[in-house]
Amino acid sequence: MSDFTSSPNTSSSTTDFGYETIPTDQKTERVAAVFRSVAKKYDVMNDLMSLGWHRAWKKFTLELSHVHTGQHVLDVAGGTGDLTKAFSRRVGAEGQVILLDINEAMLNVGRDRLIDDGCIENVQLVQADAEALPFDDDQFDCITIAFGLRNVTCKENALNAFYRVLKPGGQLLILEFSQPILKPLRVLYDRYSFSVLPKLGEWIARDAASYQYLVESIRRHPNQDALKVLIQDAGFEQCAYHNLSGGIVALHRAWKF
Ligand SMILES: C[S@@+](CC[C@H](N)C(=O)[O-])C[C@H]1O[C@@H](n2cnc3c(N)ncnc32)[C@H](O)[C@@H]1O
């Protein structure tokens, strides 16, 4: 695993951490502490909290990508490696997948899972910040970031970095929590999120605060159309999104030409 530290260029002196406003230069460490704390229970919590739906959302991402043999894929904020594993099987021995995450604890869980599943031959693990990718320009056919972008301190920096390292003709796929389209679903989802998820976090991971952050960070994240504008502002073209599970999650896809 490469050893990489970065100092991203952030333009504002404060930012959100869930519903808290904190100095911008503290967010990366606060987010790191969340994922250090939850790493070992991350996969079981993912299944419980989403009632298994995260698997379907990731499968849809994989299918829409049409990634094929020989391609180079970068899975940013890839954590414990769900998408990396699926792409590793798709690209085969001639291709390559990079599992990139800022957090060593999450990458360690990911590495162990990939070894257990026999998917490590064409996978490289890189510890780095999404805002300062340690790669040359025009390297990847596809970049994915699943449930990662809302944790990044400056989304604009990350989107610019994705644009730089994608090959011309390459695609960016962003899978992220978003805004339910129908008001009744929004109300139900809010009740479930604020009352059930921190309790589940307490019972299973012994950490209610991290799951409170998760719930709040989803509400702070730009909605479908606002994220589309950010993606286009970074230079991407043909940006479109699919609402999944009524907009609880959205998959944005855009291209670099
Ligand atoms: C909710 S997990 C998602 C993991 C995986 N993509 C999935 O869908 O299961 C978010 C991940 O983003 C990572 N992360 C947070 N900020 C990051 C940053 N600035 N650069 C790279 N990874 C980051 C965390 O360490 C964590 O592993």
Image: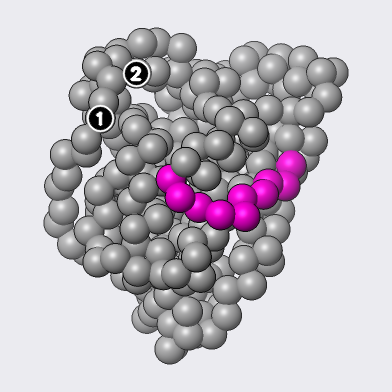
Dot 2 crowding, Cα within 10 Å, few <14, some 14–19, many 20+:
some
Q: Does the magenta stretch include residue 35?
A: no
Q: What's the mark number on residue 79?
A: none
* Secondary structure beneath label 2: strand
| Residue 60 spot, x, y in % from top left | 70, 58
Q: Write down the region rendered in magenta.
A: 234-243
Q: Nearer the viewer, mark 2 or mark 1?
A: 1
Image quadrant containing the N terminus: bottom left
Query: Residue lying furthest bottom in this view?
Result: 94
Position of residue 90 in the picture relative to residue 188 (left or right) = left
Local crowd size for mark 1, using a 10 Å CA cut-off: few (<14), some (14–19), many (≥20) = some
- Front residue of 11 and 243: 11
Residue at the image point whose x is 68% and y is 28% from the top: 179
- Say which element carries label 1: loop
Q: Residue 70 in the image: state x and y as whole percent.
A: 48, 85
Q: Earlier in the sequence, mark 2 or mark 1?
A: 1
Place residue 44 in its image quadrant: top right
Kindly identify which residue carries mark 1. Answer: 10
Residue type pointed to by label 1: Thr
Report the residue that reaches farthest toward the top. Answer: 20
> Residue 15 shows which numbered tag?
2
Q: How many marks overall?
A: 2
Amino acid at circle 2: Thr
Is residue 31 placed above or below 1 in the rendered structure?
A: above
Q: What is the spatial separation of the Cα atoms under label 2 and label 1, in whole angstroms?
A: 10 Å
Residue 29 vs residue 239, the one in the foreground: 239
The answer to whether one can see residue 106 in this image is no
* Residue at the spot 44% in from the left edge and 69% down from the top edge: 168
